Amino acid sequence: STFSYNDLLKVLDSHTRTSIKSRYSNKFFYGKVIIITSYVPLNEWYERKQERDDDGLQQLKRRISYTVDLYKDCIITNKRVKRANGEYDFQPGEPKDNPCKALYQAMPDKDENSIDDVLDKIISQVNGAL
């Protein structure tokens, strides 16, 4: 992991200004939407932290509103929910057609979908789930 657990919590905390290390002087980070990409499922992040701490990943899950699972044929938006026991988890939504599934096939010389178009489609689907 590039971020320590505590640094990631600070970046995702919407109630405090977060200073980010920078080359010549630290900068303050203000992010309305933070996109984290990983092929590792969230529950496997910081596994040692989970083993040592009763809180496990609860502080992290509390700071994340949605996760998005991307598959070849579909996209599933998972909304954060608070369980009856007080713990946070993610409830999967209905699978939606993946607008990028054509990219998994052999790409022609010129693809009509630019990466900006693809990202716009994904972000609009996430915003539609909000």
Image: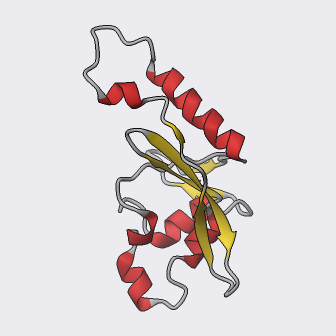
Percent position of residue 48, x then y: 36, 81
Percent position of residue 50, x then y: 43, 83
Q: Is residue 67 left or right of residue 109?
A: right
Residue that protrudes farthest toward the top in the picture: 110
Vertical side of 101 occupied by 88: above or below: below
**Front one among 33 and 86:** 86
Residue at (39% x, 88% y) in the render? 51
Vertical side of 84 occupied by 69: above or below: above
**Front one among 13 and 24:** 13
Residue at (44% x, 29% y) in the render? 100
**Front one among 130 and 49:** 130
Residue 96 in which image quadrant: top right
Q: Can you say which quadrant of the picture contains the N terminus?
A: bottom left
Residue 17 in which image quadrant: bottom right
Total number of numbered labels?
0
Q: Is residue 40 left or right of residue 33?
A: left
Color encoding of the figure: secondary structure
Residue at (69% x, 46% y) in the render? 129
Percent position of residue 91, x then y: 60, 64
Percent position of residue 110, x then y: 34, 8
Residue at (40% x, 68% y) in the render? 45
Vertical side of 96 occupied by 62: above or below: below
**Front one among 62 and 128:** 128
Residue 105 in which image quadrant: top left
Vertical side of 87 occupied by 1: above or below: above
